[in-house]
Amino acid sequence: MENSQRLGGMLPNTPLADISLKPRVLIADDSRIVRATLIKHIQGMFEFREALDGEQAWETLLLDPNIRVLITDLTMPKLDGYGLLERIRGSKISRIRDMPVVVVSGSDEQQERDRAKAAGATDLITKGIGTAQLLSRLDILSKLVNTQREYERSLEALVNNSQTDPVIQLSSPYALQTQAEAMLTYAMRHNKNFVLLNMCVGFKRAGLEAAVAPPPTGVVNAIGQLLQGTVRQTDSVAKTGDAEFTLATSSINFDSARNFAERLCHAIASANLIKEEQISILASCGLVSLCEHMVEGSATAPTLNALWDIAHRRGALGLQRSHSGVISAEEEKAFRQNSAL
């Protein structure tokens, strides 16, 4: 195993089997001073690799599967940060496509931040960030990667190890509705949030852009088992369609619910659940929350049926658009606008 000193240098031939207890971070910046400053911040808690430009960073990502997070500058020779982000988010390799990317910027201009976010940046930091704040952000992002990969392995094990279709012990749709009604009532009385997630799953064959088919029963049931084992005891999840699950949760903020849903969607889409290369799995999660409607200043509180319809509509919309990920009000608006063009 390579020691941390050697891992800090540029090692294109680092063995792929190298595994460390410390998460590995790739730092891409053409400034030696910036790289040295970032290394000083993270050394001890993280392993690190360095890249002098976007092209070198891209080749390092391809060669080293143990990199958990990328920190990149936007202005670099050969391939800038935007081009690197485009390659990463368009990669056919799931570990690269879903990798958290932290953009380092010397500017506080909102236009630059918006462009980086639109290109796929997970987080943005300034070059003067403090050690504690940087370590906290990297720790959170690296743990999210580990959680998603645990989900993937759990799904693969559930599908591959079952001799027959697994039996899932989920709430019935009626029980879910009853519990969700109680959650919503409590949330409105106590000024808490309430969230509905509608997970729609489908198989898509390459070359057939509009055709999305339901997955085999064993795969659907394995996803149900994963959901059942993931949610809190106070939450409720039910199978509400042939390849559809609905989850109700309360006392959770919108960002936490969204992050949870994103990890599940990526895990389902990335898990090795089918051997045929021409078929990919889609996982679209329609998300709606009570706080979304209260912010809009609705004169009347939304009913559970109204929220349920919105979550279902958004989940189905994502599947129709072959989109794996969360569909909230923001994504739904963008899809509708693109359709109108």
Image: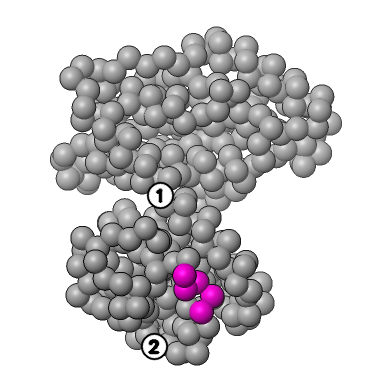
First to last magenta residue range = 40-44
Query: Which residue lies at the image location 37% right of the left edge and 42% below the top edge?
Result: 150
Residue kind at label 1, given as amino acid type = Asn
Mark 2 element type:
loop
Q: Would you identify the image quadrant in which residue 329 lies? A: top right
**Nearer-the-camera pick, 199 or 340:** 199
Q: Farthest residue in the left direction?
A: 276
Kindly report the distance in space between the C-alpha atoms of the residues bearing marks 1 and 2.
Answer: 32 Å
Q: Is residue 306 visible?
A: yes
Residue kind at label 2, given as amino acid type = Pro
Residue 7 placement (x, y as % from top left): 32, 75
Q: Is residue 82 above or below residue 31?
A: above
The answer to whether the residues at label 1 and label 2 have Cβ atoms under 8 Å apart is no
Query: Which residue lies at the image location 64% right of the left edge and 42% below the top edge?
Result: 254
Q: Main secondary structure of the magenta part?
A: helix
Q: Which mark is residue 146?
A: 1
Q: Would you identify the image quadrant in which residue 51 lies? A: bottom left
Q: Would you identify the image quadrant in which residue 197 lies? A: top right
Residue 41 sits inside the magenta stretch: yes
Mark 1 element type:
helix
Query: Which residue lies at the image location 45% right of the left edge and 24% below the top edge?
Result: 228
Badge 2 is on which residue? 77
Circle 1 packing at 10 Å, graded few (<14), some (14-19), many (20+), is: few
Residue 107 sits inside the magenta stretch: no
